[in-house]
């Protein structure tokens, strides 16, 4: 086959991120069908190719060797007479259990019938590395159950029962619950346990489930993590990701925590519909999310395109005084973007003037370690993009709040909730607080300490050259160390056939 030549994607629009994956034109929401195969990370996504607002859904497609640099490919799945193509996952059928071919790539998605609004589950497969797709002729594989309006976003995993035995498990968001199905051939599915209805947060519809087993602090003991998109009522307002930690026996999920316990995967406003990559072979659990919020998703002020993904993250579980919790860190592959390094040690941040490192750049990775003094009202830093435009991040020791304030971050009048301050309650463990941040031209992500708390945030500064302004109120705080890496943009290509 002749290889298509790729063109460099146009990144010139000022609100276009340079580190984060974004759609070349028109509308994108959830990540879908994330699977690793033959050296490529596949990222499919909810795509509407005819407008910058949500519409009849397709699956767009891109691939990457490292989750940092991406090539956009042609649309993978188009809507048809059964409906729009809603969210779902993909796996590799290593042993041809479905009979579509050895190592076929199998995608599961929801058909949304725009007339009846009914939702059913369907399958498509590819035997050429995801480049072309055949929809299964027996679709839907799981028809719409009676009286169920929300029944969508199938995520399929292989449950390994040991000694080569196992079966396929499908999770479907069904009302405020996750319904489990099992199968040996991916075509015939049997309904099993259900989890939800009264568990965790239910202030909005449950969507886009995912589930994976993680070791606790890298040891032999494991737990299952069930992640669920919540359509409204997340900590930063609007949509967000909650998760549950528990046990899974192949059929049923049992929560380790009380049903009232609510755990959040991110405290920023822009981390939704997160999905992990299937079939990664190196043992890492990796995921990313749609970097937007249904509260204002269709109003964000980008021009010919609307939709970006978070940076990919590696997830783990750690033991805390409140039980096992998710920890997240940026993928190691991002280090390839570092081009220059600046470092400071033991800087006292004066109350009045603050501390302004002599640096201005559009793309930065920042690692700041503070010595926390309980008597300080608040400290942190501003990402300053203009005389009066900045985003502030920091900590308030007295009420133990981490905060992100984007009220002055730039364009924000497209939605009343955009300029809010986002909070996370957080108890520091050893007088030190570590902020690890990636600053893109119109987005940033903050990982706190080992990643128990993260904030993923979109911002729309009219100037995207940032400088740093550290502040400490009523008493100075010591910046034990500061490392700033200037970053080069990631590389984004569009395959000629996808233009
Ligand atoms: C989540 C979601 C999914 C649905 C898709 C439609 O953002 O609402 O539940 O499948 O978007 O685009």
Image (cartoon, rainbow, N blue to C red):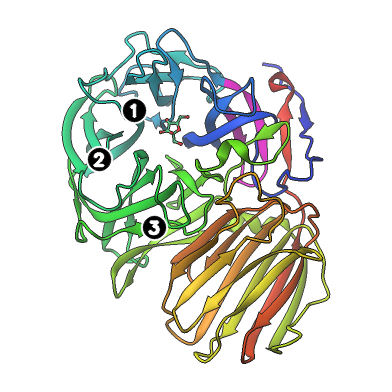
Q: Nearer the viewer, residue 352 or 464?
A: 352
Which range of residues does the magenta coloring cover? 61-75
Q: Is mark 2 within 8 Å of ligand 1?
A: no
* 352 relative to 195, above or below: below
| Whole-percent x, y for residue 131 in the image | 57, 21
* Sequence-earlier tag: 1 or 3: 1
* Residue 475 visible somewhere in the drawing: yes
Figure quadrant of the C terminus = top right
Q: Is mark 1 within 8 Å of ligand 1?
A: no
Under circle 3, the secondary element is: strand
* Residue matched to label 3: 264
| Whole-percent x, y for residue 181 in the image | 22, 31
Residues tagged 1 and 2 counted as in contact (Cβ below 8 A): no
Q: Residues within 10 Å of mark 1 (few under 14, many from 20)?
A: few
Q: Residue at x 78, y 40 (%)?
A: 11
Q: Is residue 166 left or right of residue 396?
A: left
Under circle 1, the secondary element is: loop
Under circle 2, the secondary element is: strand
Q: Nearer the viewer, residue 396 or 478?
A: 396
Residue 95 tag number: 1
Q: Nearer the viewer, residue 316 or 253?
A: 253
Residue 64, magenta (yes or no): yes
Q: Residues within 10 Å of mark 2 (few under 14, many from 20)?
A: many
Residue 165, magenta (yes or no): no
* 99 relative to 45, above or below: above
Q: Is residue 436 left or right of residue 449?
A: right
Quadrant observed for ligand 1 in the rendered image: top left
* Residue matched to label 2: 177
| Whole-percent x, y for residue 94 in the image | 38, 30
Residue 52 tag number: none
Q: Residue at x 66, y 48 (%)?
A: 413
């Amino acid at each position: 086959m002749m290889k298509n030549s790729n063109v460099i994607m146009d990144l010139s629009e000022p609100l276009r991120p340079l580190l984060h994956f974004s759609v070349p034109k028109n509308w994108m929401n959830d990540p879908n069908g994330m699977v690793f195969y033959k050296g490529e990370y596949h990222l499919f996504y909810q795509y509407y190719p005819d407008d910058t607002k949500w519409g009849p859904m397709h699956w767009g497609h891109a691939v990457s060797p490292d989750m940092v640099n991406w090539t956009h490919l042609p649309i993978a799945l188009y809507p048809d007479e059964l409906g729009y193509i809603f969210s779902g996952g993909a796996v590799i059928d290593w042993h041809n259990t479905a009979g579509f071919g050895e190592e076929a790539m199998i995608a599961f998605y929801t058909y949304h019938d725009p007339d009846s609004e009914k939702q059913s589950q369907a399958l498509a497969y590819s035997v050429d590395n995801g480049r072309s797709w055949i929809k299964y002729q027996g679709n839907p594989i799981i028809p719409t159950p009676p009286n169920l309006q929300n029944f969508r976003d199938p995520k399929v995993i292989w449950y390994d029962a040991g000694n080569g035995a196992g079966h396929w498990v499908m999770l479907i968001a069904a009302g405020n619950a996750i319904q489990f199905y099992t199968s040996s051939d991916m075509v015939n599915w049997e309904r099993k346990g259900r989890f939800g209805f009264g568990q965790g947060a239910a202030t909005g519809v449950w969507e886009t489930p995912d589930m994976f087993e993680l070791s606790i602090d890298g040891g032999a003991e494991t737990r299952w993590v069930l992640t669920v998109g919540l359509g409204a009522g997340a900590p930063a307002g609007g949509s967000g990701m909650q998760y549950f930690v528990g046990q899974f026996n192949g059929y049923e999920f049992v929560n380790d925590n009380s049903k009232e316990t609510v755990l959040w995967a991110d405290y920023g406003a822009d981390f939704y519909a997160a999905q992990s990559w299937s079939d990664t072979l190196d043992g890492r659990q990796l995921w990313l999310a749609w970097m937007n919020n249904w509260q204002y998703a269709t109003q964000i002020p980008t021009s010919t395109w609307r939709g970006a993904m978070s940076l990919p993250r590696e997830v783990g579980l750690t033991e805390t005084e409140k039980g096992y919790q998710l920890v997240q860190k940026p993928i190691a592959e991002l280090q390839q973007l570092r081009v220059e390094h600046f470092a400071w040690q033991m800087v006292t941040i004066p109350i009045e003037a603050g501390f302004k490192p002599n640096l201005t750049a559009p793309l930065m990775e920042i690692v700041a370690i503070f010595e926390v003094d309980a008597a300080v009202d608040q400290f942190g830093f501003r990402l300053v993009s203009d005389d009066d435009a900045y985003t502030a991040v920091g900590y308030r020791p007295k009420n133990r709040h981490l905060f992100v304030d984007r009220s002055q971050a730039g364009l924000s009048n497209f939605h009343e909730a955009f300029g809010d301050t986002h909070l996370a309650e957080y108890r520091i463990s050893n007088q030190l607080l570590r902020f690890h941040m990636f600053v893109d031209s119109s987005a940033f992500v903050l990982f706190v300490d080992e990643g128990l708390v993260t904030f993923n945030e979109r911002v729309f500064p009219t100037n995207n050259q940032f400088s740093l302004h550290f502040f400490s109120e009523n008493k100075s705080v010591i910046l034990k160390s500061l490392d700033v890496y200037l970053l080069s943009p990631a590389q984004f290509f569009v395959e000629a056939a996808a233009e």
